[in-house]
Amino acid sequence: MSGIGSAIAEFFTRVISIFSTYNWLSDTLDILLIAVVVYYFIKIIKDTRALTIAKGFIILFLAYIMVLILDMKASAYLFSKIFDNILVILVVLFAPEIRKFMEQLGTSRSLLRLASKLGRGNNEKVLEYNENLIRCVNSVTSAAADMGEQKIGALIIFEKETPLGEIIDTGTVVDARVSPQIIGNVFYPKSPLHDGAAVIRNNRLYAAGCILPLTARNNDVAKELGTRHRAAIGMSEQSDAYVLVVSEETGAMSIAEGGRLHRNLTDGDVRELLQDGLLLKEEEGGQETPARKFLDKFQKGGRKNGK
């Protein structure tokens, strides 16, 4: 017990020494930076298999503390070897999540969101982007509803911060303005591109006929769901994209995001989910900005029309 008491006393001594030399500017910024990095990393691994691995590491760390307290020399030696190489182990195990974090950090859309919060000069750009996005979402939703009535299957990806260049490379670049007609033509059963997925980038139909990864969580997916739905879930697990699915068997519309699948949606539900997830929302000082006013006006009009 004396060993435990001395260890606790040493811990508090170190804490006091840290605060005695605390630099309020640099050290506060240091803590905030670490907090932001940890927050976004947890946000990325949430609802993924990586979260289970992270919990395992926490249990391992607590076991290591217990081993040190009980002075178990053999176990302490084994744990020390593991934690000596912890950085390499973490990089190997969390490589996909680290890559996703770096991709989100470096995307232009993330920078646009940050810039939109720093000054009103970007309000017009945000407003223009939102206007184009709403037109794009309306066109895709209208096309999806029509295809649902005709039992035509479709798979449409809305790219967000995570670039989907590797997915686009598996298909054919189209780079056309989005309209209900062109979406319908892409997924027409006799079209050469109808079996793959379409990618919406910067509010344009950028590519079609793309191949998507399937979800690895097959046991968690309803057995009646086919390859399209499993591909949509898999795509949403590996990126922050929103994926719209139209079932060829039932005509039902679904949206996958963050590894979750929202099923049996109406066209109004689809429109609302896509707008909420994709629109750049800007609020400065609690005041309404042009982008916010435009969105509110559109939503009110949509509700009146029952959309």
Image (cartoon, rainbow, N blue to C red):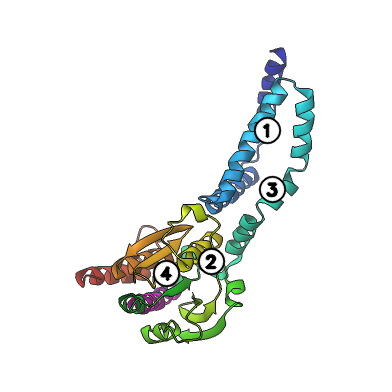
User: In screen coordinates, is 63 left or right of 191?
Assistant: right
Residue designated by label 3 = 90
Q: CA distance from mark 4 to mark 1?
A: 52 Å
Label 4 sits on a secondary structure element that is strand
**Predominant secondary structure, magenta span:** helix
Q: Which mark is residue 244?
A: 4
Q: Which mark is residue 161?
A: 2
Mark positioned earlier in the residue sequence (2 or 3): 3
- The x and y percentages for residue 47 are 50, 50
Mark positioned earlier in the residue sequence (4 or 2): 2
The type of residue carrying mark 3 is: Leu
Q: Splitting the image into 4 quarters, where does residue 138 fall?
A: bottom left
Q: Is residue 132 visible?
A: yes
Magenta stretch bounds:
124-142
Q: Splitting the image into 4 quarters, where does residue 99 fall?
A: bottom right
Mark positioned earlier in the residue sequence (1 or 3): 1
Front label number (4 vs 1): 4
Front label number (2 vs 3): 3
Q: CA distance from mark 1 to mark 3?
A: 27 Å
Q: Is residue 267 above or below residue 13?
A: below
- The x and y percentages for residue 92 are 71, 52
Look at 57% across and 70% down and name the residue there: 163
Q: CA distance from mark 2 to mark 3?
A: 24 Å
Q: Which mark is residue 162?
A: none
